[in-house]
């Protein structure tokens, strides 16, 4: 079996006080999966990614800006971002977030 299985992402990282931590869980030619842990009040300042990405808030609550839009994301919030969208994240409570960087090109689907 070539599958990768991870259980209980919300307990995978011990988040140090006043810190942000990250751990790459998986990486291949098409996908990079990174688990982040943010202590309350910690943030990633505005930046962009060269590839499309998905943010999945596993645990906690965060203020997220996506271009000109601001949202409060709670546990189990899922956000898809196109490449080069300016975004930032500030943890309101301790946060565990799964980041999926979609590195491969989308497959071309040809109607039959």
Image (cartoon, rainbow, N blue to C red):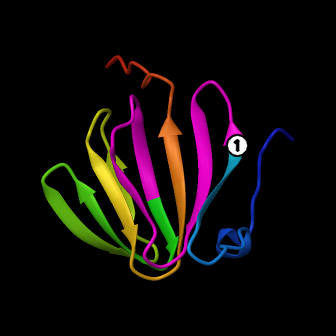
In the image, what residue occupies the spot 26% across and 43% down?
86
Stretch of the chain drawn in magenta: 26-55
Between 32 and 70, the residue placed more toward the observer is: 70
Q: Could you tell whether 89 is left or right of 19 in the image?
A: left
Residue 38 lies in the magenta stretch? yes
* Outermost residue, left side: 68
Crowding at label 1, few (<14), some or many (≥20) Cα neighbours within 10 Å? few
In the image, what residue occupies the spot 47% across and 61% down?
56
The quarter in which the C terminus is drawn is: top left
Between 2 and 79, the residue placed more toward the observer is: 79
In the image, what residue occupies the spot 52% across and 79% down?
94
* Outermost residue, front side: 18
Q: Could you tell whether 7 is left or right of 64 in the image?
A: right
Instruction: Find residue 107 and report its horizontal and vertical position in percent.
Output: 44, 22
Q: Could you tell whether 66 is left or right of 92 in the image?
A: left
Q: Secondary structure at mark 1?
A: strand
Query: In this figure, which residue is indicated by the disc labeled 1?
Result: 26
Instruction: Find residue 61 and report its horizontal and vertical position in percent.
Output: 41, 78
Residue 52, located in which quarter of the rendered image?
A: top left
In the image, what residue occupies the spot 26% across and 40% down?
85
Query: Relative to residue 36, is residue 16 depicted above or below?
Result: below
Residue 29 lies in the magenta stretch? yes
Instruction: Find residue 7 and report its horizontal and vertical position in percent.
Output: 74, 67
The quarter in which the N terminus is drawn is: top right
Between 50 and 40, the residue placed more toward the observer is: 40
Query: Relative to residue 3, is residue 84 depicted above or below?
Result: above
Residue 15, located in which quarter of the rendered image?
A: bottom right
């Amino acid at each position: 079996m070539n599958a990768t299985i991870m259980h209980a992402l919300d307990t995978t990282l011990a988040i140090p006080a006043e810190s942000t931590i990250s751990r790459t869980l998986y990486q291949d030619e098409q996908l990079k999966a990174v688990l982040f842990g943010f202590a309350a009040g910690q943030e990633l300042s505005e930046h962009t990614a060269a590839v499309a990405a998905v943010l999945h808030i596993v645990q906690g609550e965060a203020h997220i800006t996506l271009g000109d839009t601001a949202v409060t994301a709670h546990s189990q919030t899922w956000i898809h971002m196109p490449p080069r969208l300016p975004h930032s994240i500030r943890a309101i409570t301790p946060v565990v977030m799964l980041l999926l960087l979609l590195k491969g090109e989308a497959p071309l689907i040809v109607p039959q």
